[in-house]
Image: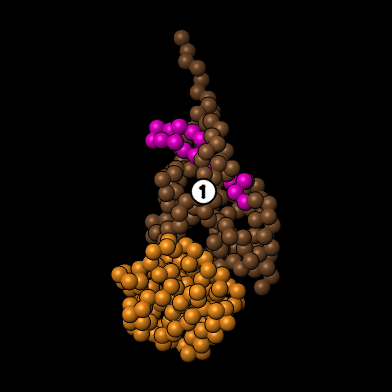
Amino acid sequence: MSVRVLVIDDDPKGRELVKAVLEQESFLVRTAEGGVSGLTQADADPPEVVVLDVQMPGMDGYEVCRVLRHGQKTRCVPIVMLTACNDASLNRKAFAAGAQMCVTKPFRREALVTAITVALRMTPEQ
Amino acid sequence: MTSASPRPGLRVVAFALAEMRLGIPLGAVECVLPMAAIAPLPQAPAIALGVINLHGTILPVLDIRQRFSLPFRQPDVNDQLLVACSARRTVVLPVDEVLGVREIPDDAVTPPGTVLPGIGYLAGIAATGDGLLYIHDLDRFLALDEERQLQQALHAMEAE
């Protein structure tokens, strides 16, 4: 059965690119154009994994991540964060907010799919 | 009357992993870092969770819980990354908590038994004041095929 992914990114091009890549890999993808919309969708129907852009206006990726981690329905959902660079301090910040994996943009298809696969593996079965 | 001189000891960095306490020889440990989100490493063996970038050096993060047949759990904010050198490479191990350096008399280390999960990855077991300490043999962490696959995946990443 297809893994249900929620992609949260304010940039329409970025959002559609991630969606297209994941749909080609048989993921079932929903998208949200910002933090508030993403949190509403995640709470209404929790996905199996969230792909979250770090740089968003208003509520940024770290803040969205923290809210997901504290949500009763979403606290165990693994989070893959899309970041601008593979930097140790940024990755520590992403982890502290609640993300397991970080993918640097621009990303390779294989890297994003591997990140989702490992993030799912690191999460205990409910 | 003189007492016998103490036997030279083995100094290990002890760490907790679920209910187990393990140790790696102090000389093999490079540093301990706070847990971080991990970057993916495509085509890596299943034992590799991904990589971290440590001062410009890409290091593989290996799933020590899986190696010792421990159940998966969501990484915790208190987890730590133990950076250690095996004979072949520097690796990063996510652990529950680094407990500190322990000195173990050589004669307190016994060969591992035969029924423990991950037995093939142990150099010995030591009875310490606060329970058993399993001494991990980092050189045996990766099987040859895993080592080869990991090397290829890291080369592919560096070539990007």
Is residue A86 visible in the rendered image? The answer is no
- Asked if residue A17 is positioned above or below residue A5 in the image, the reply reads below
**x%, y% of residue B127?**
45, 32
**x%, y% of residue A26?**
55, 79
**Residue that appears at 51% across and 20% down:** B5
For the view shown, which residue lies furthest in the bottom direction? A12
Q: Is residue B148 left or right of residue B119?
A: right
Q: Which residue is mark 1?
A: B68
The image quadrant that residue A73 belongs to is bottom left
Residue A17 on the magenta span: no
- Chain identity of mark 1: B
**x%, y% of residue B54?**
55, 61
- Asked if residue B77 is positioned above or below residue B124 in the image, the reply reads below
* Amino acid type, callout 1: Phe
Q: Colour of chain B?
A: brown
Write the start and end of the magenta stretch as one range: B124-142
Q: Colour of chain A?
A: orange
> Element type at marker 1?
loop
Q: Is B66 in front, or is B94?
A: B66
Is residue B70 visible in the rendered image? The answer is yes
**x%, y% of residue B23?**
50, 42
